[in-house]
Image (cartoon, helix red, strand yellow):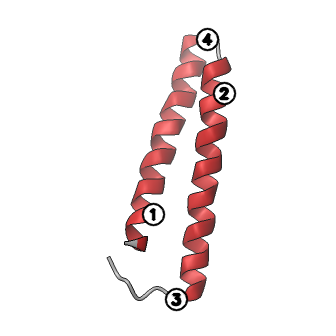
Amino acid sequence: MNNNLSELELQNLRHLIGGYETTNCKMTAYANEASDPQVKAFFQEAVTSSNENKQTLMKFLH
């Protein structure tokens, strides 16, 4: 990936990555509390998606 990111781009990446971390924590907690299997699966899918998006953004930092 391009290592020539501006300071603003780096700040935006950090903000987005932090948001995905927050989403991951919340969706994990919701999935753990859900008793309905469909609701639980919905939140677990959200966790997976959040992790994938976070990893994609992390590639810009390498």
Q: Which mark is residue 30?
A: 2
- The quarter of the picture where residue 58 lies is bottom left
What residue did someone put label 4 on?
36
Q: CA distance from mark 2 to mark 4?
A: 11 Å
Which circle's residue, 2 or 3, is located before the other in the chain?
Answer: 3
Which circle's residue, 4 or 3, is located before the other in the chain?
Answer: 3
Q: CA distance from mark 2 to mark 3?
A: 36 Å
Which circle's residue, 2 or 4, is located before the other in the chain?
Answer: 2
Q: CA distance from mark 4 to mark 1?
A: 32 Å
Q: Residues within 10 Å of mark 1 (few under 14, many from 20)?
A: some
Q: Amino acid at mark 2?
A: Tyr
Disc number lying in front (4 or 3): 3
Dot 3: what SS?
loop
Disc number lying in front (4 or 1): 1
Which circle's residue, 3 or 1, is located before the other in the chain?
Answer: 3
What residue did someone put label 3 on?
6
